[in-house]
Amino acid sequence: MKYAHYNVTDGKLIGWYDSEIHTTIPTPNIEVSEVDWQVAIDNNYNYVDVTNNTLSKKDFRTVDEIFTQTKTSKATEITQAFNNAVEFITTALPHEMVSWRKQEDEARAYVADSTVSTPFIDAQVATRQLETKDELVAKIIANADAYQVAYASLLGKYQNLSNAVSVATTVAELNLIVW
């Protein structure tokens, strides 16, 4: 027969004992059928209800521990959502914008002084029959500007939500914060 040994003050399951294996079974304990033992193992039960002689799963964390863990989890969730959104706007840019900062610098230098050599832009124009250098430069600058506007918006949202997480005082407040 199986036995669930538990803490008498809080019902927390301490360990399992089997009369076929163990010569001594600590008390307090409750006798558990093979089927109930297997269900308890499969479901990570950690609590013994001595009034009903049942096993279940119980959250033994304190309110402060739950709040701290929820706050940490929410901060991580917001950061991940921000990173995903930045990755999305970066990959949503046209293929020629993969290294957009370098290209943007080249494009802005070209606009400021059309004699500036722009190897990337020259190579792109050489492979495109329908775009002039000026059209490609304008497109790169427009995409860079759009990216910067989108990034600034995402960064502002991230900062606002991160601030909301840091000042939240309850789990309910934290649950209301969504990307």
Image (cartoon, helix red, strand yellow):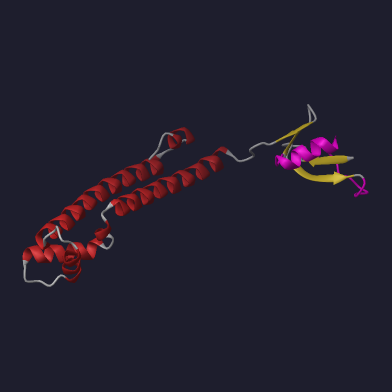
**Residue at (35%, 48%) from the top-left corner?**
85
Q: Is residue 152 visible?
A: yes
Q: Position of residue 89 (x, y in %)?
A: 30, 50
Quadrant containing the C terminus is top left
Whether 97 is among the magenta residues is no
Q: Quadrant of residue 96?
A: bottom left
Q: Is residue 41 above or below residue 139?
A: above
Q: Quadrant of residue 110?
A: bottom left
The residue closer to the viewer here, 86 or 118, is: 118
Whether 37 is among the magenta residues is yes
**Residue at (8%, 63%) from the top-left corner?**
111
| Magenta residues (range) | 20-45
Q: Position of residue 41 (x, y in %)?
A: 75, 42
Q: Is residue 130 left or right of residue 80?
A: left
Q: Is residue 127 above or below residue 175?
A: below
Q: Number of callouts in the render?
A: 0
Q: Position of residue 98 (x, y in %)?
A: 28, 60
Q: Is residue 55 left or right of residue 117?
A: right
Q: Is residue 29 visible?
A: no
The residue closer to the viewer here, 156 or 101, is: 101
**Residue at (33%, 51%) from the top-left corner?**
86
Q: Position of residue 1 (x, y in %)?
A: 90, 40
Q: Is residue 47 above or below residue 51?
A: below
**Residue at (24%, 52%) from the top-left corner?**
147
The residue closer to the viewer here, 153 or 127, is: 127
